[in-house]
Each structure stands twice: as structure tokens, then as C-alpha cells.
């Protein structure tokens, strides 16, 4: 039986120590692929793929999107809705970087649904702000304003000045 805590620790170590040379980056990728293919759970794989997506986003948004899509699939298999929300967030960032406006809107709508189901006001407010931006980008200004107002209404009771300013 594999030692899950040890595997997770090795995975984290591999992810955070590979910032050196190209050879080191290749070794890190190989080690991570081994960890992802070997004995990691779907949840561990989803978390690792989210990290990989963020790592490659700046120089390879297409690969970042592929990692994020795989993270979403793994998170769905795992059944952890908060992890699924995190994977969808990685997907949305890559879609936005690639100019995939309709796909970004769909992913954001799905994130809003998950945040509502989780009952997490902070996530829901952030997602509604993102949804407002999606509608603004699609020139659907009435919907953009409606969702921005909803985000603000959710944020005000939190009494978090920074969150209110963002809403």
C-alpha cells in the first residue's frame, strides 16, 4: 500500500524545488509525471495540475489550459467541490489569457454555481465579479451591472474593506 502522506510531500518538494536550470526543470517534470502516474489520488493529481497550469501560464497558455482541463476532470473524479472550483479558476485564467471569451463565460458560470452550492460568500462574490467582467467583455452591460451589484450585496455584510473595494 503506498504511503500517501510521503507521496504528497515528495510531490510538493518536487514542485517547489524545480526553479533552476533547464535540466532541473526537465527532471522536475519527469518526477512530477511519475508522481502523477504512480500512486497519487485524483485529488492530488488535480492539485498538482493546477500548480503546473499556473507555472506554465506566462510562457505557454495553451499547455496551461490543457493542465487546467485535466485538473477539472481529476477534481470531478475526486468529488471535492472546493478543489473543482480551484481547477475551474485555473481553467478560467488560461481561457482569458487565450481570448476564449465564450468558454471563459461558461467556466465562470459553472464556478458561480459551485460557490453557491458551497455556501461560500467570499468565493461567490469573487466569481460574480468575474462574471460581471465576462458580460462586460461580451458587451452585455445590463448583465454586467446586475452581477456587479450582486457581488457588492454579498460583500458588504463581510465588512472586509478590500473585498468591498474590489466589488
Image (cartoon, grey):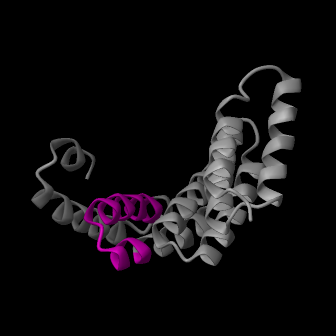
Segment tinted magenta in the rendering: 113-136
Q: Residue at x 80, y 36 (%)?
A: 28
Indicate whether residue 77 is drawn in magenta: no
Q: Residue at x 37, y 62 (%)?
A: 132
Res. 100 visible in picture? no
Q: Position of residue 44 (x, y in %)?
A: 64, 59
Foreground pick, 2 / 103: 2
**Residue 156 location, x and y as percent?**
13, 58
Seen in the image, is 71 located left or right of residue 26?
A: left
Residue 141 is situated, as x and y percent measured from the top left of the image, at 37, 66
Above or below 40: residue 22: above
Secondary structure character of the magenta stretch overall: helix
**In screen coordinates, is 34 left or right of 161?**
right
| Residue 54, placed above or below residue 123 | above
Where does residue 111 sit, x and y in percent of width and height?
A: 46, 70
Residue in view at x 78 percent, y 46 percent: 32
Q: Horizontally, is 145 left or right of 106 in the view?
A: left
- Give the position of the N terminus as an image quadrant: bottom right
The image quadrant of residue 122 is bottom left
Residue 91 appearing in the image = yes
- Is residue 116 covered in magenta? yes
Amino acid at each position: 500500500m503506498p504511503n500517501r502522506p510521503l507521496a504528497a510531500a515528495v510531490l510538493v518538494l518536487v514542485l517547489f524545488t524545480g526553479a533552476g536550470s533547464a535540466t532541473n526543470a526537465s527532471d522536475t517534470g519527469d518526477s512530477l509525471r511519475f508522481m502523477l502516474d504512480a500512486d497519487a489520488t485524483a485529488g492530488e493529481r488535480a492539485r498538482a495540475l493546477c500548480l503546473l497550469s499556473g507555472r506554465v501560464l506566462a510562457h505557454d497558455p495553451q499547455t496551461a489550459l490543457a493542465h487546467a482541463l485535466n485538473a477539472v476532470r481529476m477534481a470531478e473524479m475526486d468529488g471535492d467541490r472546493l478543489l473543482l472550483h480551484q481547477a475551474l479558476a485555473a481553467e478560467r485564467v488560461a481561457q482569458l489569457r487565450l481570448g476564449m471569451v465564450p468558454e471563459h463565460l461558461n467556466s465562470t458560470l459553472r464556478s458561480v454555481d459551485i460557490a453557491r452550492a458551497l455556501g461560500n460568500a467570499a468565493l461567490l462574490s469573487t466569481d460574480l465579479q468575474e462574471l460581471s467582467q465576462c458580460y462586460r467583455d461580451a458587451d452585455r452591460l445590463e448583465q454586467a451591472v446586475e452581477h456587479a451589484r450582486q457581488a457588492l450585496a454579498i460583500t458588504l455584510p463581510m465588512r472586509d474593506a478590500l473585498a468591498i473595494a474590489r466589488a
